Structure formats: structure tokens, C-alpha cells
Image (spheres, rainbow, N blue to C red):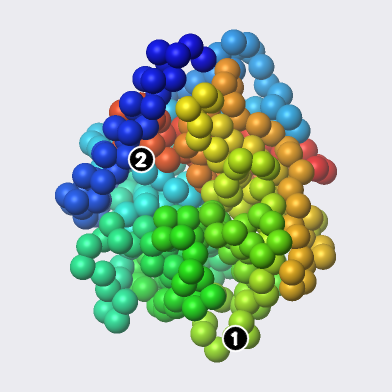
Amino acid sequence: MRGHARWWLLFALLLGAAGLYLWGLVDKPARAKNGPIAITATPLVLDGASPTRTELGALHFLGAWQLKGPSRSFGGLSAIHMMPDGQLLAIHDGAISFTFPQPGAGDIGTVKKLPVLKQTGEKRRYTMDSEALVVDPDSGEIWVGFELLHRVCRYSPGFEKALSCHDWPQMKDWPATESIESMARLPDGRFLVISEGAPAEREGREAFLFARDPTDPGQPAPIRMSYVPPAGYNPTDAVWIGDNQLLVLNRRATLYDGFTAIITVVDLSHMKPGALLMGREVARLAPPVLADNFEGLALDEKDGQRILWVISDDNHLFFQRTLLLKFALPKKL
């Protein structure tokens, strides 16, 4: 990258930091209103240098879109989930949910603020930095991880009611803005929570395995392990894909490369206290391939084919985009 381009990127990043600060002061997400919202999806190619490219590492490219809403209240999406009805559920990092059809299936979605328990209510909604999302396909209950608060909350289906919340003391020393970023529910009901930036004792990032619902304070203390991301990257989301495997989305931002991401697969068959969860690279999102601030993963299955969705958080900044990518997973990774 030429020198003037590096300085422009530095200026953009500094401007973005200032924008995030002002965004918190004005508490813009709190002005979002519950109800319908129109969301447009503009198709994109995966690789601008090779428009017909369909393979990315072990993944097969099925589609990519830039999502836009009618106002700047849309965006800032930190996690996604594919609902049984085929719609995507996304969490805004200001405690707001968006539900919308897959691209090509309609353009009307729904906005809904997450309800707040009275005993855990916050004066400013932006302090409820919602970054991680899990949905039980059987009960429809929803769990959300809040980064700034080091808190996990459980909700009734459709976010109709906040059911329970808990702050785990083991997380109190996690960095406020690099805390609960990734959360996955295993088939046996256990939960795995990975910190974005809290260093583990040996190496990598702290990872906690909960015996059951992490909002239940009556269970044993979580098993402490560590997830080792690719060098220079931080984990931003994770999703269980079966066969004792977890996919983890890892992000990096540098002046030279801008935003890049690496998706890794992790073997979870040997989880125990102190275990190192090592990832193996599955795919890399870096220019000329579509690249941005990728923060969310979702898994779906259609006609026996596993589908992986990836979404980016635009931080409501003019130089970032809300990108939605769709890939086919091979039968084995």
C-alpha cells in the first residue's frame, strides 16, 4: 500500500473512533422504533479481481450482498442466526434485533428493542453492548452476550420478555470492549463462551465452558480453557457445526491490510480444564476478496447441504458496509 493510502486509512480509522464515541454520547440506537423496516440487498461478487470465482478455501461461494436500511439506525450487526422460518435474526450492538428475509425472498424486516429486566436495567441502552447470540431451535429461547457488562441474558421467543440475566465473576477482569464476543450452544445443552481479547494463562483467549444455561448461577463454575486464534487475530463469533466441531470467525484490522478475517475449525472432542482449543484455517476473507469488519456466523441446512452465513458490522461508519455472505460447507472439514 502506498504511503498516502496508509495515511488515508489511518485518518479513516481515527475518524471512525471519533464517530463511535459520538454515537455513544447521542445514544442513537435508542431512537430506533419497534416495527417494520425495509432492507435492500444489492448482489456482489466474491472477488473483484476474479468475478467468476466460487471457491474460497474449503468453502463454496453461493452469494454476497450489501444490506442497507432506510436510515442509519440499521447496521451495527454483531451476530446472526437462521430462524426455522428461513428468516435471518441479527443483533445490533445497541440491544436491538433485526429480523429480515434472505436476499431474494422479500425486503421487509422487523426492528425490536431487547426488553430489559428491571433489576438489571441500564440508563443508557448503548451500555448494553450486545455482541453474541444463541437460539434454542426447540424452545425458541434466545441468549445474548453483552460485552461491556460481562453479562448473559436469556429471553423468551421473539424477545417478548427478558427471563434471566447473570454476570459471572470469572469474567469481571475481561477487557470491557473485548469481552463476550463469541457464544455457542452445544447439542447437550452446554455453552461455550470465548472472549475477544482476554488473554488466557498459557496462550490465546480465555474460553469458558458452562455446564448449562449461563444465566443460571446455581451451576458449577465454568471450565476455563483457551482458544488460540490465528496470529494477530481476535475471535468475533463461533457456531457449532456438528461432529464435535466449532467454526470460529477471527478478525484483524491493520493500517496495511484494513479489515481481514479468517474462519477456523476447532475440534472440541478433548475439552477439559486448561485445554488449548487450536483452530485450523478453513477460509480467509482478505482483498481482493470481500473484506470488512466481519463479526457474525450462522449455520443453516437445506436439502442436506450445510450453509454458512457471514455478516459484517459497519459500525455506522461511511467507509464500512454491512455485508452478508453465503457459503456451502463441505460434508467434512
Of 91 and 23, nearer the camera is 23
Q: Kindly identify the amino acid type of the residue bearing the numbered disc 1.
A: Gln
Q: Kindly identify the amino acid type of the residue bearing the numbered disc 2.
A: Asn
Q: In which quarter of the image is residue 159?
A: bottom left
Side (left or right) of 275 relative to 10: right
Residue 287: image location, x then y, percent: 57, 21
Q: Can you say which quadrant of the picture contains the C terminus? A: top right
The residue carrying mark 2 is 315
Q: In this view, does 184 lie above or below 22?
A: below
Q: What secondary structure is marked by label 2?
A: loop
Pointer 1 with pointer 2, Cβ within 8 A: no
Q: Quadrant of residue 153?
A: bottom left
Side (left or right) of 329 relative to 129: right
Q: Which residue is drawn at 33% across and 62% down?
A: 128
Of 71 and 255, nearer the camera is 255
Res 283 seen here = yes
- Mark 2, residues whose alpha carbon is within 10 Å: few (<14), some, or many (≥20)? many
Q: Is residue 93 above or below residue 293?
A: below
Residue 104: image location, x then y, percent: 46, 30
Of 123 and 142, nearer the camera is 123
Kindly identify which numbered label has been placed on residue 240: none
Q: Which residue is drawn at 54% across and 54% down?
A: 196
Side (left or right) of 228 relative to 2: right
- Mark 1, residues whose alpha carbon is within 10 Å: few (<14), some, or many (≥20)? few
Q: Residue at x 41, y 45 (%)?
A: 77
Residue 238: image location, x then y, percent: 61, 53
Res 97 seen here = no
Of 236 and 161, nearer the camera is 236
Residue 251: image location, x then y, percent: 56, 40
Q: Is residue 227 above or below residue 261?
A: below
Kindly identify which numbered label has been placed on residue 219: 1
